[in-house]
Image: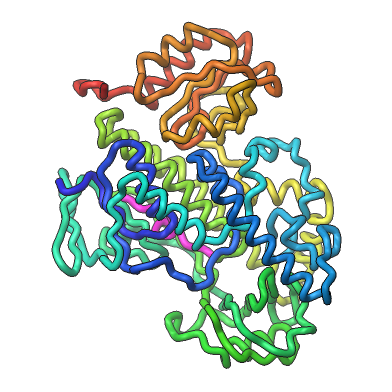
Amino acid sequence: MDYDVVVAGGGPVGLMLACELRLGGARVAVLERRTEVDLTIKGGAITTPGAEALYRRGMLPAMAEVQRQAVDRFRAFIREQNGGDGGGSGSGAAGQGLGIVGHFAGIMLRADLVDRTAAGLGDAGPAAEIAFVAQQDIERLLGERADELGVDVRRGVELTGFDADDGAVTVRMRHGAVRAGWLVGCDGGRSTVRKLAGFAFPGTEPEITCHQAVVEMTGAEDLKVGWTATDTGVYAHGPMPGRIVTVEFDGPPADRDAPVTAEDLQARLRRVCGVDVTITGVRTATRFTDHARQVTEYRRGRVLLAGDAAHVHSAFGSQGLSLGLGDAMNLGWKLAAVIGGRAPEGLLDTYTRERHPVGAQVLDWTRSQVAAMRPDPRSRALRAIVSDLAGTVAGTTYLTARLNGCGVRYDVAGAHPLTGRSAPDLELTGAGRLADHLHAGRALLLDLADDPGLRDLAAGYAGRVDTLTARCPSRPRLAAVLVRPDGFTAWAADAGAPTPAAGLAKALQEWFAVPEGAVAPG
């Protein structure tokens, strides 16, 4: 084999997956047809699950610095719009981006209305403070990390085909071929890997055409900042100079690949906002629709999919990037364990089982936003009700929880409330936070009750499961947590729970046992 895994696509999801595989000891090549990061405007924010994943791999300081710069640019934009007044988090539309946690159909969700004591919302630690990190910045940061970890990233190289058998995959490029044990398609919504492998891709047809651009324009003084619904659609202005979004309900574009021109953008913006704006230049522009599709399975033999290759939907709510990073985190450690002989191949069956429902929820989230954006009277009545709900603590808390995936719980055996959920970022006495101990991409048994019996069980999984004994005053009843490499809870027990050792032994066997007949690593 030339590689253990070939990853098709070197965007954030492909790079994240490659980094996870390298942490697990796999030899990885990333094939990316572009020669550099695509500067076309894309997602300008990330939701908490994506920030949490990167935080768990030690990337919080880099993300925080990128966000600081983004917020500074936004404040400068607001000062310009307000004639020198920087505004504040309570200044209506002018404060959007400084005191909001996201939006639903362009209805802003105010941070001061979120009840952080609600289940899951107070558990992400510092990652919950990260939002304004653009997709290009994440791709750049992950590219640097991939280089540090020794991932073979081949830019300017495009997958043209492949042949898979029971033992390997031969991946063809324009100039040669490589042979690998596995192929993962992270090559976007029009995935070549998905099409060639024959994955079923059912879903709903598009009904809207959206344009997002950064332009130079005159006559924009009457454009409202933030998201605005009108009689003909929805538009957004900001949070950077010249950034505009238009949403029109006239069906999908006749030619998705046609160049986006200044004339077309101007006509659409005028039609939606009713302001005679003149666009004099286009720095970057793209169009998208709301077609929503998802493969029925994420694996076919030795070929797997992650990110937009597995699911496509509109960009409303900025959940797509976090969804893809979650796919990469879930698959990376499992595939690396199978390759390294630390797990049976059947472990990969849990990838579809765990991630498909999460993707389906995001597709429905975006479909529901389109329903609340339509300009017809029934939809506008619905929008008014949702707006009222978003002005309450209960409503904003619910919408924020959905936006941040707080309802996600994998089908993991165990009755403890934490089991199957993203592990809370516990603050530990003298030992930092839980995420500080997940940088290496291994599982962790956190012993909060100083129980040598539990530690002895974990010792049998050395090299696969780390052990930490610490105290957590904020969770006095929590005795122990077994955290998978992706940050999700495989098992947990409270103080006084009956036979905790039996539960831990079962979880360790289920997730980290070496296959029968294999030799344990190390």
Image coloring type: rainbow
Left or right of 58 on screen, residue 80? right
Q: Quadrant of the C terminus?
A: top left
Judge whether residue 515 is colored magenta: no
Please tell me which residue is depicted at 35% across the width and 51% down the height of the picture: 147
Look at the picture and state if 50 lies above or below 509. below
Left or right of 154 on screen, residue 109? right
Residue 460 position in % (x across, y down): 35, 14
Residue 484 position in % (x across, y down): 46, 30
Seen from the viewer's position, the closer of residues 454 and 77 is 77
**The image quarter in which residue 407 lies:** top right
Report the span colored magenta: 303-313
Left or right of 388 on screen, residue 263? left
Look at the picture and state if 121 lies above or below 102. above
Please tell me which residue is depicted at 70% across the width and 66% down the height of the picture: 74
- Label tally: 0
Look at the picture and state if 371 lies above or below 2. below
Judge whether residue 306 is colored magenta: yes
Seen from the viewer's position, the closer of residues 268 and 375 is 268
Left or right of 168 on screen, residue 263? right
Please tell me which residue is depicted at 69% across the width and 76% down the height of the picture: 235
Residue 505 position in % (x across, y down): 42, 15
Seen from the viewer's position, the closer of residues 365 and 501 is 501
Please tell me which residue is depicted at 69% across the width and 78% down the height of the picture: 233
Residue 365 visible in image: no
**The image quarter in which residue 242 lies:** bottom right
Residue 328 position in % (x across, y down): 42, 47
Look at the picture and state if 76 lies above or below 440. below
Residue 522 visible in image: yes
